[in-house]
Amino acid sequence: MDDLTFSARRVASPARPSDAPADLEVRFRTLVQSPLRAGILRYLSARPDESFDVESLMQTFGRLRLDVENCLHELVEFRVARVVPGTPPQYAAARPPDPAVADLLDGFLERRAAVSMEDQSPSVQRFREMIGRDEKMLIVFEWIRTAAKSDISVLILGPTGSGKEVVARMIHELSPRGVAKFQAVNCAALPDTLFESEIFGYEKGAFTGAHDRKPGRLELADEGTLFLDEIGDMSLIAQAKLLRVLEERRFERLGGHKSISVDFRLISATNRPLEQFVRDNRFREDLYYRVNAFAIRLPSLRERQVDIPVLAQRFLGRYCAAQGVPLDSKDFSREALDLLAAYSWPGNIRELESTVSRAALSAPGRTIRARDVEFLHATGPAHQQPSDRLPSLADAERAHIVRVLEAVKWNKKEAARVLDISRGTLYRKIVEYALEPEARSAGKRGHGDD
């Protein structure tokens, strides 16, 4: 938690004239040895005419509230930052009254800041854009930092469009393997006929058209990371071959006889209910425990509704920057933001970003109106725009499943009976359509959920 184990009041109390210079320097060095405290101090000092609340600093540094509040408390006690009264209170840079402390602060600010691994990671910067006011994504960030410290296999769970590959790349880039390659494979787009050649590679002449030797993704991921996206769509045959590699850390190219040793870190992702797949014998139990040593669950956008307007404004700013126009050249009307906030977002952040870009492009003036917002999935409860389009089969199926689930108060066993499908199929449909119970009924579900 960024070096917060020592006593803040004892180590970082305000500087006093009676302090010996050597002792004062030691205490100041202790204050700024934490990357987070040092980062906040530099951030505030670089913007002397501005003040920031805790929430904005949480988003900027990707840290939980308690971490940020503790660091700010220590900076204020050392008188290198000050509190600006208000609701909520804000924090700004301060010039220490003690000349000795002021000299130490100037020396610190003159030194070039060390660039952290997080600041060097492109995926971290992308992930920070996905952080809003809800702390759920900050908790995910802490899980990512924890996972990056070891070589443990990670399973990333989350609906489509929630940023699973961004998280996988973050873990890789923040880990000791970050200097090596990151190999991503989409298992859903990989049939059995191509699995071996793609994962293991092949020798020249292994099959018709194999004119040269080709290394597989495993070989390319040596000393790096192999990311298997949508691992829940992998066939049982492919699962068995993957399990063997995970156990032996050796493989042979297709058409070859030489055993090749490989050292890689495995990260997997899925939007499928793997536990149910294991019960249905659709996913090997032994492989499940191999890939699920450490699980990270990404929340859907619907689970952090308060973030939707924040992210929409952020994506609008990015759109304006990409078009080379001022960031304030486009803005949302109140009605447009209300419409975005009420939509169910089955495509999550990815869908929100594309929806904002389409709305900005179609809006004739500076203000994006509700009529300029067009959703890809027109069956959500918030979609009030009139349309003559007949519902697709998928739209009708989604709406019917929602009606049944609501009618039985989200008792999935009962819903599967009414729909005349297996519970495994129902779980798959729930994930596919990103269905969730209304917040008002979430507290009533109890043990009937299963």
Image: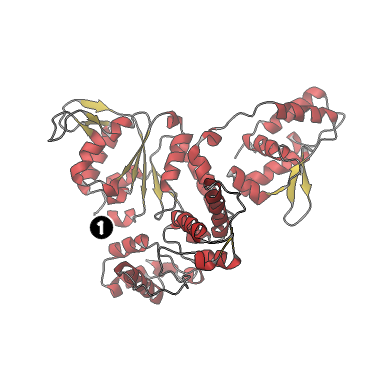
Q: Residue at x 28, y 51 (%)?
A: 233
Mark 1: few, some, or many residues within 10 Å (few <14, many ≥20)? few
Q: Where residue 225 sits: x, y (%)? A: 37, 35
Residue shown at the point (33%, 29%) measured from the top left: 222
Quarter of the image for the N terminus: give it.
top right
Residue furthest out toward the right: 17
Quarter of the picture holding the C terminus: bottom left
Relative to residue 151, is residue 22 drawn left or right? Answer: right
Local SS, label 1: loop
Counting labels gives: 1
Amino acid type, callout 1? Asp
Q: Position of residue 416 (x, y in %)?
A: 30, 70
Q: Is residue 194 above or below residue 364?
A: above
* Among the 4 quarters of the image, the one containing residue 291: top left
Q: Is residue 294 left or right of residue 78?
A: left
Q: Which residue is mark 1?
A: 280
Front one among 345 and 31: 345
Q: Residue furthest bottom?
A: 407
Q: Is residue 153 above or below residue 113?
A: below
On the question of residue 262 being in view, the answer is yes
List x then y, in percent, for residue 41: 70, 37
Is residue 300 among what the camera can see? Answer: no
37 and 204: which is toward the camera: 204
Q: Position of residue 65 (x, y in %)?
A: 63, 49
At x 77% / y 55%, what residue is drawn? Answer: 86
- Rendered residue at 77%/37% (across/down): 80
Q: Quadrant of residue 195?
A: top left
